[in-house]
Image: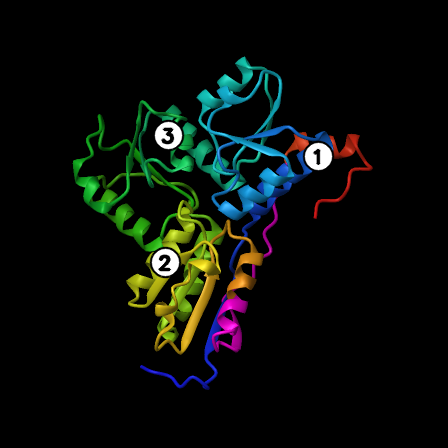
């Protein structure tokens, strides 16, 4: 479908999009730690999976490391929003590190469930992507009884000591449809399988996927702002493509191939839960300069979730009342 060069084209701006409460909390923790204690502040792994956010915090004085062994003894270290295995906590104690835990509370919920099932002598099936930081952390809670599956096809190969004593948990950033298919396969193989009291896929992941589903058929192209290592951002692309709509993941507006826009009258734009709004606004400007001047915000559902800061940060703020407010 070709459009005239003078025709105003449409940009559907999805809402909710971008930062979730867990990401806001994690970024705030790093900023407040830098403001309160001053650098160096070490961060284990990427605080959230977004290149822009990590580079911005580096410029403010954060030092990102892959392992706590890289942190000098006695220094402060922040755990990323994706959580850590108990072995990481033990290593931090041995190095006498001053830990600030930025694990998303919804990820902590999955860790608690894993511990509960393991103590109940269940074999645990963890649904997710094997090398993702969140899965690595959760797997570490009960590695001897836990198996990871990332597709329904892998379920048939599962072997457990007692098929009547099996439980499952999921990564918080999975595709709802993908998780549903795997859970159904698990229930067929293990009819008595138990799951979490409430689904593990987080509210923000679900809301952003529902928003994409709501507009995918109205759009010729769906653009998702997010970094390549962001699981929830990749899932948004998959959701659109599964509905037959062309979709691409972009870190910034510079990743947009002009060929993608040829013959495209309507673009839908969203952002993964770790992508900052400033990058979305740059994409809006980029598309506006190319004729997408009819910008329509499409809100599928409101989000008002907020998470409290960890006690280490609250105490630090209380001890330093003159600290500058976080931007």
Q: Which residue is mark 3?
A: 139
Crowd tier of the residue under label 2, counting other residues whose Cα lies within 10 Å: few below 14, some 14–19, many 20 or above: many
Along the viewing direction, whichever of 284 and 313 lies nearer the viewer: 284
3D distance between C-alphas at marks 1 and 2: 37 Å
Query: Extreme top residue here?
Result: 94
Label 2 or label 3, whichever comes before in sequence order: 3
**Image spot of residue 165 (x, y percent):** 28, 31
Q: Is disc 1 in contact with disc 2, using a CB cutoff of under 8 Å?
A: no
Q: Secondary structure at mark 2?
A: helix
Say left or right for 262 vs 185: right
Above or below 307: residue 13:
below
Is residue 114 placed above or below 219 in the rendered structure?
above
Mark 2 or mark 3, which is nearer to you? 2
> What range of the chain is rendered magenta?
284-309
On the image, numbered disc 2 is attached to which residue?
Answer: 237
N-terminal of the pair, mark 1 or mark 3, is 3
Say if the magenta span includes residue 293.
yes
Residue matched to label 1: 314
- Quadrant of the image occupied by residue 122: top left
Rendered location of residue 65, percent (x, y):
50, 29
Answer with the quarter of the image where residue 229 lies. top left
Q: Residues within 10 Å of mark 1 (few under 14, many from 20)?
A: few
Disc 3 secondary structure class: helix
Observer-side mark, 1 or 2, equals: 2
The residue at 46%/77% (across/down) is: 10
In magenta segment, residue 42:
no
List the single residue furthest toward the right: 322
| Left or right, residue 307 beside residue 201 | right
Q: In the image, is residue 181 above or below residue 119?
A: below
* Helix, strand or loop under label 1: helix
């Amino acid at each position: 479908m070709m459009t005239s060069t003078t025709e105003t084209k449409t940009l559907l701006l999805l809402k909710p999009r971008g930062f979730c409460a867990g990401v806001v909390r994690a970024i705030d923790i790093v900023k407040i730690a830098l403001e309160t204690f001053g650098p160096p502040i070490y961060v284990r792994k990427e605080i959230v999976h977004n290149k822009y956010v990590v580079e911005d915090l580096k410029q403010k004085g954060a030092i990102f490391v892959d392992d706590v062994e890289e942190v000098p003894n006695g220094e402060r270290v922040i755990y990323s929003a994706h959580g850590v295995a108990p072995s990481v906590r033990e290593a931090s104690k041995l190095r006498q590190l001053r830990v600030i835990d930025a694990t998303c509370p919804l990820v902590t919920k999955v860790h608690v469930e894993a511990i509960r099932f393991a103590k109940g002598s269940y074999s645990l099936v963890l649904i997710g992507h094997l090398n993702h930081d969140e899965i690595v952390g959760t797997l570490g809670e009960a590695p001897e009884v836990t198996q990871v599956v990332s597709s329904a096809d892998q379920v048939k190969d599962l072997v457990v000591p007692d098929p009547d004593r099996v439980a499952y948990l999921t990564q918080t950033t999975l595709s709802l449809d993908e998780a549903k298919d795997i859970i159904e396969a698990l229930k067929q193989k293990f009819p008595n399988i138990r799951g979490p009291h409430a689904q593990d896929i987080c509210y923000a992941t679900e809301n952003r996927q529902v928003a994409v589903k709501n507009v995918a058929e109205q759009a010729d192209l769906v653009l998702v702002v997010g970094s390549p290592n962001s699981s929830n951002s990749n899932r948004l692309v998959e959701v659109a493509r599964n509905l037959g709509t062309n979709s691409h993941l972009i870190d910034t507006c510079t990743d947009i191939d002009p060929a993608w826009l040829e013959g495209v009258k309507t673009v839908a734009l969203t952002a993964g839960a770790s992508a900052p709004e400033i990058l979305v606004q740059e994409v809006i400007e980029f598309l506006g300069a190319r004729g997408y001047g009819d910008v329509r915000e499409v809100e599928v559902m409101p989000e008002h979730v907020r998470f409290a800061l960890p006690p280490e940060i609250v105490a630090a703020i209380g001890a330093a009342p003159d600290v500058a407010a976080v931007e």
